[in-house]
Image (spheres, rainbow, N blue to C red):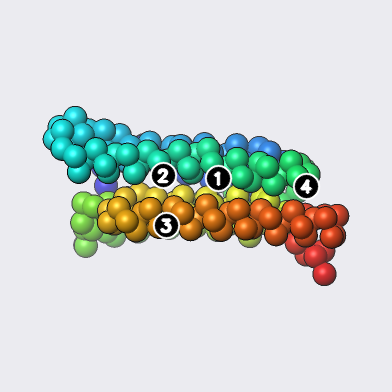
Amino acid sequence: METAVFLAFSPAILITAWASITRETRRMIHLLSLQAATIGIVELTSCIIDVIAGLTLEAFIEFLMAFIEWISCVALIPFILYLCMKRTENTVSTPMVSVRKTVAIMVTMAIAYLALEAWLLSFNPIPTQLETLPLCILILSEAIVVTAVHRDAVKILVGLNMAINALYPLLSHVPLVYIALDLASIIFVNVIAAFVVAKSFDEHKTLVITEWR
């Protein structure tokens, strides 16, 4: 993998890892927006180059879809979660796993990523269109950790959306109709999830899912 690709995704890797030790819900929503922005800007830049180089209708449509998806992940979905937080509460809670253990997990995953990258480059190089696959796997793994270490329902939704964002570079190579359907389903699921969380908060007066009994 080119160094430029790794450097482009480095902010997203750090932001996702930071979310695993963040205590405040509002800050986690901000991190979700930043993560989506840093992941999506790579694909947006590629689409802009294609539009400038080719000046074709197909390239422009691809750029438009990428831009709509980017805006949705950066602004719309975080806004839905922000409204959910305002409807419930902005909790400040300590993750279930200590900072030291979480950092150890993240370091282990980074080492595993380096080993996977070295193996792919040495023995079985992947196609150019999938060159971001190891980085996507790393960010996805970090997002799963984010989801696992928090008990707050809104924070868990943030972690799940971070995991979805990690797949964004891979989805850019599928037909546009699938991207549109995927984006619509993600927005719909977030709206429903936010509604369920708000109703559960009204009933249980807490966002800690282990106390929803």
Specify the quadrant that holds the C terminus. bottom right
Residue 56 or residue 6, whichever sits in front: 56
Helix, strand or loop status at disc 4: loop
Callout 1: 10 Å neighbours few (<14), some, many (20+)?
A: many
Helix, strand or loop status at disc 1: helix
Q: Mark 3 points at which residue?
A: 182
Q: Name the residue under label 2.
A: 69
| Residue 40 placement: quadrant | top left
Give the distance between the C-alpha atoms of the residues marked 1 and 2, in whole angstroms. Answer: 10 Å
Provide residue 55's location: percent of width, then percent of height: 15, 33
| Residue 101 placement: quadrant | bottom right
Closer to the chain start, of discs 1 and 2, is: 2
Helix, strand or loop status at disc 2: helix
Q: What residue type is labelled 2?
A: Glu
Q: What residue type is labelled 3?
A: Asp
Describe residue 77's horizontal placement relative to residue 172 as left or right: right
Q: Mark 4 points at which residue?
A: 88
| Residue 148 placement: quadrant | bottom right
Give the distance between the C-alpha atoms of the residues marked 1 and 4, in whole angstroms. Answer: 17 Å
Q: What residue type is labelled 4?
A: Thr
Q: Mark 1 points at which residue?
A: 77
